[in-house]
Amino acid sequence: MNAILTDKRYCPYKGIPSMTPDFVHYYLKSLGASSIGQGCVVELGCWLGATTRALLDGLAESQYRLPYHAFDRWLATSDQLPKAEAQGVPLTLHQDLSPLFQKNVSSPFVFMHQGEIGGSLTTTLVVQLRYACSTLRKKILFSRGA
């Protein structure tokens, strides 16, 4: 039997290969379900979308309709190949994983940012976070001032 399949650190979520255990998926789903719908979501390192899908499932329960920013390289690495293969998804080295991610998460609220964390991707992330924080700060200030 494949060691990765028996390793409980790697549990697919709804058929999406994952590098995380089941309890993480359940936690993310419950976290999303308890969302109050303020601010945006930023996820770093999404791989094939298992954690993204779990969080989105929870967010859907809370009627969340704000941007979800997903950041990843989406290029298959040598250590990812056996993990995906053991979960039924064969990959090739340096394969562009963004189409698989898109298929797995399938949401109009998800905005993908592909590249290395650093350089222009860091600038994009900082701008997105500043915007999200300033928007949230304005909502908090206006709700307190009444």
Image: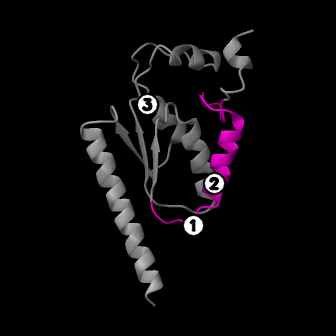
Kind of residue indicated by mark 2: Leu
Horizontally, is 58 left or right of 79 in the view?
Answer: right
- Which quadrant holds the N terminus? top right
Residue at 60% x, 31% y is 16
The residue lying furthest to the top in this view is 1
Residue 63: image quadrant is bottom right
Q: Is residue 129 above or below residue 142?
A: above
- Give the extent of the magenta segment: 12-39
Badge 2 marks a residue whose secondary structure is helix
Kind of residue indicated by mark 3: Pro
How many numbered badges does the structure rendering display?
3
Is residue 3 magenta-colored? Answer: no
Residue 54: image quadrant is top right
The numbered disc on residue 99 is 3
Residue at 43% x, 13% y is 93
Pick the front one: 19 or 59? 19
Residue 102 in the image, given as x and y percentages of width and height = 46, 37
Horizontally, is 20 left or right of 100 in the view?
Answer: right
Horizontally, is 122 left or right of 108 in the view?
Answer: left
Kind of residue indicated by mark 1: Ile
Q: Are marks 1 and 2 in contact (CB under 8 Å)?
A: no
Residue that numbered label 1 is attached to: 36
Residue at 59% x, 48% y is 55
Residue 80 in the image, given as x and y percentages of width and height = 52, 19
The numbered disc on residue 31 is 2
Label 3 – label 2 distance at C-alpha: 26 Å
Label 1 – label 2 distance at C-alpha: 10 Å
Answer few, some or many: residues within 10 Å of disc 2's Cα (few below 14, many 20 plus, some between 14 and 19).
some
Badge 3 marks a residue whose secondary structure is helix
Q: Is residue 17 above or below residue 62?
A: above
The numbered disc on residue 63 is none
Nearer mark to the viewer, of 3 and 2:
2
